[in-house]
Amino acid sequence: MAFIRLEITTASGEKFFHLLSEALRPQTILTAIGGRFMSYVDESFRTRGRGMWRPLSPLTLLLRKHGGGAPLQDSGRYKQSFVQETDNQTFVEVGTNLKTDSGLSLGAIHEFGTGPYTIRAKRAKVLAAQTRGGGWVFFGKEVHHPGIPARPVLPTKAVAEKLVQDTLDAMLTRLAAQQGG
């Protein structure tokens, strides 16, 4: 049987091998990848989906609590709800568990958008919303909402794979630089 044997006999080689084995621990790798995914999410919010998000409608702008025209960022609650979770061995995931009052995933609504839907008054005679200035907008007994446009913040599968590869390449490059080669 043919085999290859690797023996490290220098102090610098032993140090590099130790650094490499530490860097290649699943926990270290998954934490680095999760951090990169979180940076991607932050960048999505900062750049309004890398310039791809539809602007807010005039009515939405009128009804915003805090003003400003940045989608998904009126109160900051949605953006701040993103977290990174890992079992430190086999997976890392980045996302949000935030739900609407009716229990729907807020992340799915914004990531993929919705089709048109109808909103009906249940506890009042008409639907109404208060504007930031204190006035009211009255809609009637029901509203035919045009739907919420998709405003993705998470990377696509292809982008996620590239982020993983770039993260691993950077980790190995940094280790090699620490060893002077």
Image (spheres, helix red, strand yellow):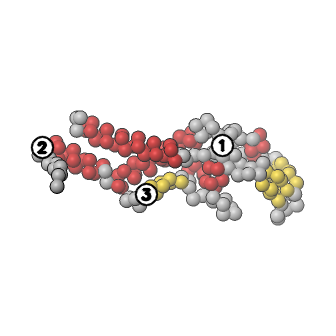
Q: Which mark is residue 91?
A: 3
Q: Please give left or right for residue 81 compared with residue 22 in the image.
A: right
Reply above or below: 150 against 127.
above
Q: Position of residue 34 (x, y in %)?
A: 44, 50
Q: Can residue 50 be seen from the camera position used here? A: yes
Type of amino acid under label 1: Pro
Circle 1 SS class: loop
Alpha carbon of mark 1 to alpha carbon of mark 3: how far?
Answer: 30 Å
How many other residues sit within 10 Å of disc 1, few (<14), some (14-19) or many (≥20)?
Answer: some
Q: Foreground mark, 1 or 3?
A: 3
Q: Position of residue 180 (x, y in %)?
A: 22, 35
Circle 3 SS class: loop
Between residues 114 and 39, which one lies in front from this camera angle?
114
Alpha carbon of mark 3 to alpha carbon of mark 2: how far?
Answer: 35 Å
Q: Position of residue 173 (x, y in %)?
A: 31, 38
Reply above or below: 22 against 125.
above
Type of amino acid under label 3: Phe
Mark 2, residue position: 10
User: Residue at (54%, 46%) from the top-left corner?
Assistant: 156
> Which numbered disc flags the more N-terminal residue, 1 or 3?
1
User: Residue at (60%, 40%) from the top-left corner?
Assistant: 49
Q: Please give left or right for residue 154 compared with residue 141 in the image.
A: left
Mark 1, residue position: 71
> Which numbered disc flags the more N-terminal residue, 3 or 2?
2
Give the number of callouts: 3
Q: Foreground mark, 2 or 1?
A: 2
Type of amino acid under label 2: Thr
User: Residue at (34%, 43%) from the top-left corner?
Assistant: 171
User: Residue at (77%, 40%) from the top-left corner?
Assistant: 58
Quadrant where the C terminus sits is top left
